[in-house]
């Protein structure tokens, strides 16, 4: 494989627009390319994707490779793994970055294996230290942060945690070449079939965008309790989040509201944790909230150690009057 | 159905955060905190048991570890798995995800006519989530990750619901295949009394590198793909002001007032 210090990001697009994580990949990719004295290239896969190639340049790519193939119009683990691997072999980058997304986390391990390198998954920070990729990630359910470096600097591959890195400001004066490259995907290589996709989006404000989050855990006790949390969130103009327990118990219908290690990372202005113990796997997803408030009936609960304001009480007793008080304040 | 489930032993991820300690870039096993089966792996065993209940078959639980790892295999047996295998050898010590996948692949190839290999979505300690995918590559089998529901259709086709951030995708794959199982599959069953007795009685074969013939240059600490520079604990602690009051209404009023002062409502 040629050694030309290219940082290659595997971008993703939806309906011709590059996704948020793609902009983040370009943002961090630019820094790494600087550290390597190399260039930042973007790879985009699909069909009808030329516009997204131009957008990638606006967000920092020095050049773009498009792989357009009818077989790639829809995500498929087999065809995408093959396409990304072949594209990397043709381009010869020294660093390959993907988002830790539906696509990225699915293909990264296999792409890395086929290219003969070690994949480092879900990184929250990336840096270059004398040609080597320094990777920071959360381990032990958020209890610890590991900084690791690839032993082999020839080719290094990582996925980045969405929302952990900063995109560049778009600049339409940036110029770069957009080039189509061809890959060969055999039908027999496609062994899995995507039959359907079902969205379970929660109504109202998206958790990731909410300024206020009311989160409930195992202490909520039943589905009716979550109704009360919904009311509270609506009044505050916020969204409801959960730990994993309410889904396991069947009080909420989906895991799309889960915050933490296996769910979403949020940074609202106000986070109100109700009936939540404060397990590291949960806190890792909300610890950057500006103001953390805990309501828990156990004064020893770990959640108080990571909160700014706390109420030691049964939430069923304090939440109804709290809703009324907030309503009254918001009316003034 | 011949199902293999890969199970890993981990430090109990549900232990209280304050018990988690580091020394010299290493996690120190806190006293009184047991090693447990990785939660997603218990869920993978659960998924296998659900398939077996409907379609019959045999479940083999397999782990790469030390003698101590017998306990995770026993846990799987107590839940209802039929066989267990322990892969242990000095040469395996310190293996990373790629090496672990290679060791598992060599072992699985020794087991007759495997239809389905299940892994957890990720190990609760290092959470790379790549043993399953690399195992699929090694075995040259198709892979579906993040399964939350699986159903065997006719013609040896498996229907898999795969978790995505706001919903799920449905995939079909013909067997044999490798899956990684996500926690959305639901709580795993607890072992029964009979299950525990069976698990204790069961002979669990121990395989060493002689049994599976891995190339030792690709496994163990020397083959590690990453070097650890540092391991630290995040600073998350805040100073918590407890808001009080005589009655719930007074507490609520005081809290609402503070939220107003902070400018967040
Ligand atoms: C690999 C892995 C990944 C994980 N990922 C996540 C993740 O992404 N997000 C996540 O949240 N968890 C995750 N978990 C689970 C996590 O470890 C904890 O089990 C979980 O966060 C605990 O949820 P909880 O605090 O709501 O529940 P519990 O442990 O049940 O705690 C309930 C709390 O509510 C309090 N309480 C009870 N009744 C009341 C009442 N009436 N009023 C007020 N307080 C009350 C109790 O005192 C207690 O503190 C993960 C675990 C693993 C192993
Ligand atoms: C730099 C570095 C330092 C490390 N230091 C340590 C350390 O000090 N102590 C330590 O315990 N670990 C350490 N690890 C982690 C260890 O290398 C991995 O845990 C191990 O190789 C498995 O990979 P994973 O955790 O990424 O598994 P994942 O890919 O997340 O596992 C996914 C699934 O694969 C299967 N699986 C994984 N491992 C096994 C296994 N052993 N047997 C059977 N099935 C399995 C399970 O089904 C699991 O759910 C370190 C890793 C790195 C990168």
Image (cartoon, helix red, strand yellow):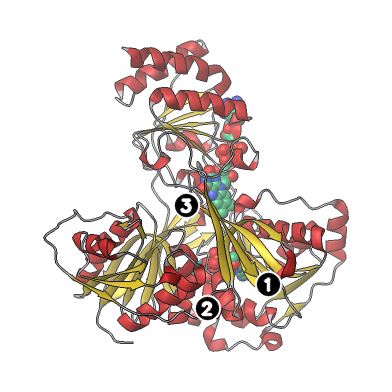
Whether the residue under disc 1 has CB within 8 Å of ligand 2 = no
Above or below for A262 versus A178? above
The quarter holding residue B239 reads top left
Name the mark nearer the viewer: 3 or 2. Answer: 2
Disc 3: host chain: A
Q: Residue at x 25, y 75 (%)?
A: A179
Q: Quadrant of residue B230?
A: bottom left
Between B64 and B26, the residue placed more toward the observer is B64
Mark 1 falls on what kind of element?
loop
Q: Which residue is mark 1?
A: B175
Q: Which residue is mark 2?
A: A187
Which quadrant does the C terminus of chain B fall into?
top left
Residue wearing tag 3: A142
Q: Secondary structure at mark 3?
A: helix
Which of the two residues, A227 or A155, is positioned nearer the viewer here? A227
The answer to whether tags 3 and 2 share a subunit is: yes
């Amino acid at each position: 494989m040629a050694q030309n210090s290219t940082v290659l990001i595997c971008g993703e697009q939806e309906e011709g627009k590059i996704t948020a994580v793609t902009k983040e990949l370009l943002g961090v990719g630019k820094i790494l390319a600087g550290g390597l004295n190399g260039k930042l290239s973007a790879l985009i896969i699909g069909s009808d994707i030329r516009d997204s190639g131009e957008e990638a340049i606006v967000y920092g790519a020095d050049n773009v490779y498009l792989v357009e193939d009818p077989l790639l119009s829809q995500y498929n683990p087999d065809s995408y793994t093959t396409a990304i691997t072949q594209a990397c072999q043709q381009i010869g980058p020294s660093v390959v970055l993907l988002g830790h997304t539906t696509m990225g986390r699915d293909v990264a391990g296999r792409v890395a294996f086929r290219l003969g390198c070690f994949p480092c998954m879900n990184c929250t920070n990336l840096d270059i230290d004398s040609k080597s990729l320094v990777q920071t990630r959360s381990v032990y359910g958020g209890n610890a942060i590991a900084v690791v470096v690839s032993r082999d600097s020839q080719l290094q591959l990582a996925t980045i945690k969405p929302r952990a890195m900063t995109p560049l400001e778009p600049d339409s004066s940036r110029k770069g070449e957009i080039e189509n490259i061809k890959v060969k995907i055999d039908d027999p290589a496609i062994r899995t079939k995507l039959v359907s996709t079902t969205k379970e989006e929660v109504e109202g404000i998206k958790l990731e965008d909410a300024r206020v989050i009311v989160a409930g855990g195992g202490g909520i006790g039943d589905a009716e309790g979550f109704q009360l949390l919904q009311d509270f969130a609506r009044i505050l103009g916020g969204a409801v989040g959960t730990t994993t327990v309410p889904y396991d118990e069947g009080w909420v219908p989906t895991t799309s509201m889960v915050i933490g290690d296996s769910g979403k990372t949020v940074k609202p202005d106000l986070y109100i944790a109700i009936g939540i113990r404060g397990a590291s796997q949960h806190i890792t997803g909300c610890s950057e909230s500006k103001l953390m408030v805990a309501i828990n009936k156990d004064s020893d609960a770990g959640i108080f150690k990571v909160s700014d304001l706390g109420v030691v009480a049964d939430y069923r007793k304090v939440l109804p009057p709290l809703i009324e008080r907030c309503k009254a304040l918001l009316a003034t | 159905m011949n199902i293999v489930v890969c199970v890993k032993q981990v430090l109990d991820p549900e232990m209280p955060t304050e018990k988690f300690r580091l020394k010299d870039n290493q996690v120190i096993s806190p006293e009184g905190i047991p090693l447990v089966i990785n939660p997603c792996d218990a869920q993978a065993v659960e998924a296998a048991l659900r398939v077996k209940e409907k379609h019959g078959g045999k479940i083999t639980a397999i782990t790469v570890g030390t003698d101590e790892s017998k306990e995770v295999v026993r846990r799987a047996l107590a839940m209802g798995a039929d066989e267990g295998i322990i892969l242990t050898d000095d040469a395996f010590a310190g293996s990373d995800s790629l090496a672990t996948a290679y060791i598992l692949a060599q072992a699985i190839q020794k087991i007759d006519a495997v239809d389905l290999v299940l892994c957890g979505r990720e190990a609760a300690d290092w959470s790379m989530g790549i043993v399953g995918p690399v195992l699929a590559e090694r075995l040259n089998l198709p892979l579906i990750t993040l399964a939350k529901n699986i159903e065997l259709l006719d013609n040896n086709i498996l229907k898999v619901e795969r978790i995505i951030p706001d919903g799920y995708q449905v995939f079909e794959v013909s067997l044999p295949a490798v899956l990684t199982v996500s926690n959305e599959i639901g709580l795993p069953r607890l072992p029964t009394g009979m299950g525990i007795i069976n698990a204790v009685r069961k002979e669990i074969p121990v395989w060493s590198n002689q049994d599976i013939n891995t190339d030792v240059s690709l496994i163990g600490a020397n083959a590690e793909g990453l070097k650890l520079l540092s391991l630290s604990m995040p600073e998350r602690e805040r100073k918590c002001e407890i808001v009080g009051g005589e009655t719930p209404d007074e507490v609520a009023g005081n809290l609402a007032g503070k939220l107003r002062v902070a400018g967040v409502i």
